[in-house]
Amino acid sequence: MAFRTFVGWPLGLISSRARRISAALVLLPLCTLATVGPASAQQHASEAAGIHQTVRGTNDTWWKHAVIYEIYPRSFQDSNGDGIGDLNGITQRLDYLKDLGIDAIWITPMYPSPQVDFGYDIADYTAIDPQYGTMADFDRLMKEAKARDIRVIMDFVPNHTSDQHPWFIESRSSRTNPKRDWYIWRDGKGPGQPPNNWLSWFGHSAWRFDAKTGQFYYHHFYPEQPDLNWRNPEVRKAMYNVLRFWLDRGVAGFRLDAVSRLFEDPNLHDDPLLPGTNAYGDQNIEHKYTDNLPEVHEVLREIRQVVDAYPGNPVLISEADEPNISELTKMYGSKLDEIQLPMDFQVADVNQRCAACFRELIDQIDDNPVGGQPYFFFNNHDQDRTWDRYGDGVHNDAIARLLAALLLTTRATPQLYYGEEIGMVTTPPTRKEDVKDPIGKIGWPKEKGRDGERTPMQWDASTNAGFTASPTPWLPIPTSYKQRNVAIEKEDPDSLLNFYKQLIRLRRNQPALRNGQQTSVDCHDSDVLSYLRKNPASGESVLIVLNLSNQSKKVAFDLKHLGINGASAKPLLTHPKSSPTQIPLNAVPLSPFSTLVAAVE
Ligand code: GLC
């Protein structure tokens, strides 16, 4: 399949993000032949300020070394035959995750919910939706995960609740209800006219009229997801208690959903108009007055204080689809007192096999001025799988390995999404009547929604891929399951699954990959992405060379300025498999889309 654009998310928003990213790429300098040297002045300043941060890449906090795996519980494993995945299903598959080398799982919401946004519309933050199990099932999952040294990270959705949450039911009951101010209620501009032009991320006006009290409420996402009012101290208190509830049950941290959307301009200025229309037919706007308001950072600091009061270094991961490095850097907090791991959407969404693009972005985040730990991922439940976004339709398996190597050999904390390790493909619905994700109904056919990347995990070649005993899984099983499944790939030493496993083991066991500093090399090559990881203590070094092009190449490396004087590299992992035990550094042969991970001295 040819390159597909990023269709898993509203088109207008994505293209504006892509525009901002490419602008950044033009403006920023290409990597230089920097040497791996002592900590920067900035780091010394951080240390002097009492920030617990050692030389980059050497701090031993668990989340710097963890391989994190995102689970969409509805689609991972069904244990009770109702066609929907559940918590006991996850527990059943922990041995698989352990064997893969996973250190922590992030489970997307499994709280009680009407499931309009498949769990991101929460009706009770401190319970389990019966379709996913019980609190006893959750506790058992925690216990079994702990027995395998796997941490559990919860999804925390602070921006909005379900319209079925008791808080909102109270809030909408009258203008004088004590919970009225827990949400954003405003008068319309005139009869039938919303307060301003703000648009929902999911299409059309972000305001919904509520006839009972004659006012509009604000919803950044679906109308069934009213936004909480984070300027109300009672809301903050209640939400921080939600965090404590789960921390008390032993969770290792949270992935914070849509955090940049917590605040809106209190003066309700109209957003600036942009040319063109989005997938839903609305005039495009810049979400200037509803996204990334400075108060977000005050809340992030407060959330950090809540989790920091618990032992074991709980982690905060933010969904931060920030447009450039300076916005992304802000997520860490100027004193590293906000988010430890802001997701780097810029790297995830390069959406081209472009060595220069990756190099720029990787170097920028590696060199972020506050010394924050980078966090990379390529797949998640909101966007087309990389198989389709990066594949060329012919070499998809080799390209998947290039991305796996990139994900698992930089110093960024890596996150996988279930199924990427076996090469699952995006399988969007072909008929509007089959669509489950509401944005696919609103935006059809331009926007088909996110069902395509949420199809059930492919465990084996039996009926319904071993996901469920029900004849009707909640989403259809992609036809690729007969060849691409865990059971088959487990037995094949050359499978993508075993390639991921080997990479994860290398990451864990090679001191250079575990703790090494990172330097881009061969900076002007537009086809081949290469970088060196070097352990500052032992000097052990690993060179990663990724040929992102469909051309055979021969590349030469001179790494003396990085303290590498040896003339050859010893392959640790390659694709395609290669036999030489040593490769001369002055003539490294690379076949199209090949991966080389090699020790150098
Ligand atoms: C986040 C989630 C997405 C959800 C949205 C609204 O972006 O990743 O799945 O629809 O927030 O909660």
Image (tube, rainbow, N blue to C red):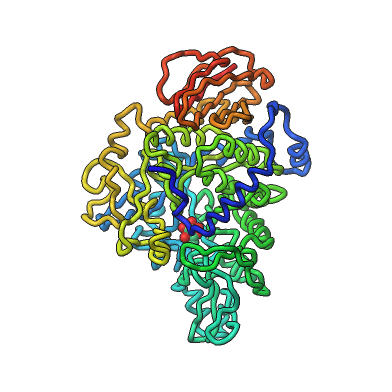
- Quadrant position of the C terminus in the picture: top right
Q: Quadrant of residue 130?
A: bottom left
Residue 157 location (% of width, % of height): 51, 61
Where is residue 40 drawn, in percent x and y?
74, 34
Nearest the viewer among 472 and 244 is 472
Relative to residue 167, is residue 420 depicted above or below?
above
Give how far across and how far down residue 139 sits, in percent.
Answer: 41, 53
Horizontally, residue 167 falls left or right of residue 452, namely: right
- Residue at 65%, 74% (x, y): give it: 268
Image position of 506 with respect to 190: above or below: above
Query: Measuring 36% from the left and 43% from the top, which residue is drawn there?
Result: 424
Q: Quadrant of the N terminus?
A: top left
Asked whether residue 311 is in view, the answer is no
In the displayed structure, would residue 589 be above or below residue 312?
A: above
Q: Is residue 41 above or below residue 79?
A: above
Pick the front one: 461 or 312: 461
